Image (cartoon, rainbow, N blue to C red):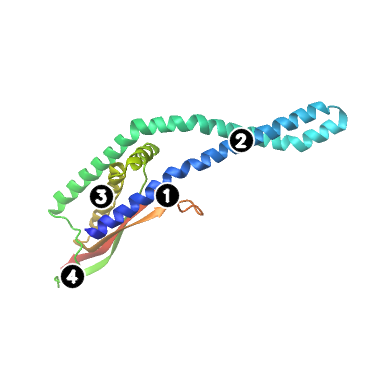
Amino acid sequence: MRLRNRREGRVRAEVIQVIDSDAPRRRVLAITALLLVVGFAGVVSAAEHGGGGESGLEWLLWGPLILFGIIITIIGIVWVVGYPILLAWAVLFSGKKLDDQIADTVQREGQTLATLGRDPLTTIDGGYRTDITSCGIVWAGVVYGPSHWFLLRGFLNNLIGGSIDVFQKVVSAGRAEAMQRLREQAVTHGYDDVINVRIDTSNMAPQGAKSLVKAVEIFAYGTGVKYG
């Protein structure tokens, strides 16, 4: 229990760091503004030195840069306008989506337990059984990540301290889904039990920016056994 709580605490602490992921957005805006200034200066320079070959040469030199600046500007505008819309969408629907995913996991788990009559997953090694006829590795994984709305709530919660329930909910949902997928894999492969079950997590972050955790991969595995 203490090991599991320590792992969940580590995951929550590292997921919080994704709040800093607004830095790329600010860099895009700064680059866009710089390219606009350079492009505008090029247009003004070409207009002031209008005439013949010099003007054509200047347009040949400045044209690709101006075109690139226009493209980046359009991307920047779409980003600036689209981000608040996506954030509003997350505020309205991300919580409901997570609740629906949890409900789906619970429903599937109930169906599996009703069919088998018991939970096939156990953390013990199964050494007390001597009638095992076949065995094999069974594993399942899932990737979960908080929405930007969850991150904002977590950031505000982190200012005053205490338990960050929204992150706990995301991690718990991911763990439950990974365990249910492990049950389904056991049934698919015809195993009666999965013994020595372990569950682990790993952070998913951009290469070279390990502090910007984007999501958490939750990996469950164990030894599937079939009894004679």
Q: Report whether residue 142 is seen.
A: no
Q: First in sequence: mark 4 or mark 3?
A: 4
User: In front: 188, or 98?
Assistant: 98
Q: Amino acid at mark 2?
A: Thr
Tag in front: 4 or 1: 1
C-alpha span from label 2 to label 4: 65 Å
* Circles 4 and 1: CB atoms closer than 8 Å: no
Q: Residues within 10 Å of mark 2 (few under 14, many from 20)?
A: many
Alpha carbon distance from label 4 to label 1: 42 Å
CA separation, marks 4 and 3? 27 Å
**Left or right of residue 132, residue 16 in this image:** right
Quick one: quadrant of the N terminus? bottom left
Tag 2–tag 1 contact (CB < 8 Å):
no
In this orientation, which residue lies closer to the viewer: 63 or 169? 169
Helix, strand or loop at label 2? It is helix
Tags 2 and 4 touching, CB below 8 Å: no
- Label 3: which residue? 176
- Dot 3: element: helix
75 left or right of 153 in image: right
Closest to the camera, between mark 2 and mark 3, is: 2
Residue corresponding to mark 2: 32
- Residue 87 seen in this snapshot: yes
Nearer the observer: mark 4 or 3; the answer is 3
Lateral position of residue 37 relative to residue 130, left or right: right
| Distance in Å between CA atoms under marks 2 and 3 | 43 Å
Q: Quadrant of the C terminus?
A: bottom left
Which numbered disc flags the more N-terminal residue, 4 or 1?
A: 4
- Type of amino acid at the residue the image marks with label 4: Ile
Specify few, some or many for label 4: CA neighbours under 10 Å numbering under 14, 14-19, or 20 or more.
few
Would you say the residues marked 1 and 3 are in contact, meaning their CB atoms lie under 8 Å apart?
A: no
- For label 4, the residue is 132
**Disc 3 marks which amino acid?**
Ala
